[in-house]
Image (cartoon, rainbow, N blue to C red):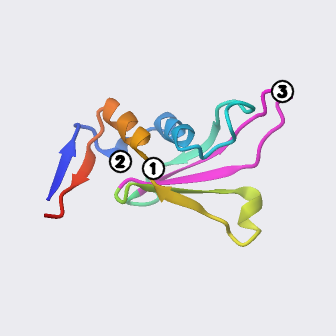
């Protein structure tokens, strides 16, 4: 059984809302030294269950650009992964995991239908 909370489908997440998830999940350079990520590209139609954004950050002290990041959010599996441009050429390191409680709280506060599964 699946219980849904909220009225907005996760498929409707915006680029700005994904940026907030990136920040919450720590998938960008640390905000103590870097500005918030700047979205370069956003696509919510390429995959049936996943949104992606390309983004960069700029260091606060001298505005040096960070690596390019690509962040994928699978809203059906409630998980994400991201890569950095230099890692794609070095053994394809992929950082992935399920979203955390803080992201769930954020999505609930925005009115999204966060699925809760009961396997009973």
Which of the two discs, 3 and 2, labels the residue nearer the N terminus?
A: 2
Secondary element under disc 1, as helix, strand or loop, is loop
Q: On the image, numbered disc 1 is attached to which residue?
A: 44
Q: Earlier in the sequence, mark 1 or mark 3?
A: 1
CA distance separating discs 1 and 3? 33 Å
Picture coordinates of residue 82, whole percent (x, y) = 59, 56
- For disc 2, the marked residue is 11
What is the span of residues highlighted in magenta in the rendered image? 50-75
Q: Quadrant of the N terminus?
A: bottom left
Name the residue: 54% across, 60% down. 96
Distance between the alpha carbons at the discs numbered 1 and 2:
7 Å
Q: Nearer the viewer, mark 3 or mark 2?
A: 3
- In primary-sequence order, the first of circles 1 and 2 is 2
Q: How many marks?
A: 3
* Residue 61 screen position, x and y as percent: 83, 27
Q: Which mark is residue 61?
A: 3
């Amino acid at each position: 059984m699946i219980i849904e909370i909220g009225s907005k489908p996760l498929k409707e997440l915006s680029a700005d809302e994904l940026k907030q998830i990136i920040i919450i999940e720590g998938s960008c350079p640390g905000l103590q030294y870097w500005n918030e990520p700047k979205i370069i590209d956003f696509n919510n139609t390429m995959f049936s269950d996943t949104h992606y954004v390309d983004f960069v950050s700029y260091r606060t002290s001298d505005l040096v650009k960070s690596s390019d990041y690509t962040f994928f959010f699978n809203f059906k599996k409630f998980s994400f992964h991201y890569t950095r441009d230099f890692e794609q050429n070095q053994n394809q390191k992929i950082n992935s995991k399920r979203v955390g409680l803080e992201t769930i709280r954020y999505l609930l506060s925005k009115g999204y239908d966060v699925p809760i599964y009961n396997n009973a």
